[in-house]
Amino acid sequence: MDASKYRMTFDIHTHTTFSHGTIRPHGKGTIEENVQAAIDQGLSEIAISDHGPGHLFYGMKRKDVPVMRAEIQRLREKYPQIRIWLSVEANVINNGGNCLDVRPEEMDQFDFVLAGYHFGTRKGHMLGNFRDAHHLSLPGERKRLLRDNTEMTVNAVLRNNLKVLTHPGDKGQFDMELIAKACAKKGTWMEISTWHDHMTVEEIRIAMKEDVKFIISSDAHTPDRVGSFIGGLERAFEAGLPLDRIVNVVERK
Ligand SMILES: [Zn+2]
Ligand SMILES: [Zn+2]
C-alpha cells in the first residue's frame, strides 16, 4: 500500500491529560496540544475523547467535564480553522441499564459519545477477561466470557446512540457478527484502531458482511500520534474493505 495516496480527514478518538493515571497522567498532551497536532496534520475535525469516569485507573473525573467544555470553547475561538468536539470514550460494562459508565442523563454533556471495552472497570468481567488475556482461563470460562462480553457490548450499542464502538474485539472474547449487526442497526461506526491490534483483519472480514461503516482512529495518547491511520488502513485493505466504507479516509487528489 502506498500510504502517501491517502489522507485522514478527521480523528475523533484522542486522549489528553484529563485521562488521569494513578501516578502520572495516562494521556500525555493537553487539549490544545492535540488540537494543534490535528491542525498540523491537516485534519478538519478532532474530538477529545478521554476515558469514561468509571475506569478505576485512567478515567476522567466527572467534575472535569465543565472544565474541558470551557477549554474547548476557548480553543474553538482561537482555532476557527478546525472543528473541535468534546466526546468521551465511555466504558462498556454490564450494569443492567445502559451498559455504560456514562449515565443516560450525562450523555448531553458531550457532543457525541464513543464507547469500548477496557480492563479496569467494575462490572466488566474484568478478572475473567484478564485471566483469558493471559491464558489462565478457568474451565468453561471462555465460553461464558464470549457470551457475557458480547451481550454487554450489544446492549451498550442498542441502548445508546454511540457514534463509534472503539476497538471492537480488544481485551476479550467477542462475537463480532452479533456486534456488527447491532452497529448496523444503530448506525454506530466500528473502529479500526491504529493503536490497538483490533479490529483484526479477520474481525473486519466478519463485520463487513453487515451493513456497517468503519472509522479509523489514532486513539492517540500523545499529541504526536494524533491523525495516525496507516496501520489501520493497511488492515482494512488486507481484509478487502473498500475505501468508501471508511468514513474518514480519502484518496489524495
Ligand atoms: Zn480504548
Ligand atoms: Zn482510547
Image (cartoon, rainbow, N blue to C red):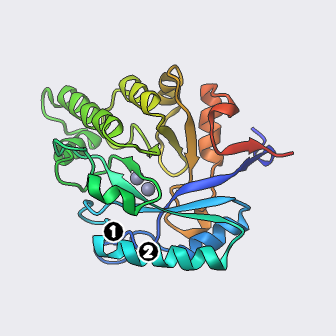
Quarter holding residue 24: bottom left
- Which residue is drawn at the image coordinates 27% and 49% (left, top)? 100
Between residue 40 and residue 113, name the one nearer to us: 113
- Which residue is drawn at the image coordinates 63% and 28% (left, top)? 241
Secondary structure found at label 1: loop
Mark 1 vs mark 2, CA separation in Å: 10 Å
Q: Residues within 10 Å of mark 2 (few under 14, many from 20)?
A: some
Where does the image place residue 178, in percent across and percent down from the top left? 36, 24
Where does the image place residue 247, in percent across and percent down from the top left? 63, 41
Q: Which mark is residue 68?
A: 2
Quarter placement of the C terminus: top right
- Position of 66 with respect to 78 (left or right) is left
Residues at circles 1 and 2 in contact by the CB criterion of under 8 Å: yes
Quarter holding residue 76: bottom right
Residue 108 visible from this viewpoint: yes
Above or below: residue 82 compared with residue 125: below
Quarter holding residue 1: top right
- Which residue is drawn at the image coordinates 47% and 65% (left, top)? 15
Q: Could you tell me the amino acid type at mark 2? A: Met
Q: Residues within 10 Å of mark 1 (few under 14, many from 20)?
A: many
Give the labeled residue for mark 1: 60
Q: Could you tell me the amino acid type at mark 1? A: Met
Residue 30 visible from this viewpoint: no
Give the mark nearest the N terminus, 1 or 2. Answer: 1
Where does the image place residue 95, in percent across and percent down from the top left? 17, 46
Where does the image place residue 124, in percent across and percent down from the top left? 21, 46
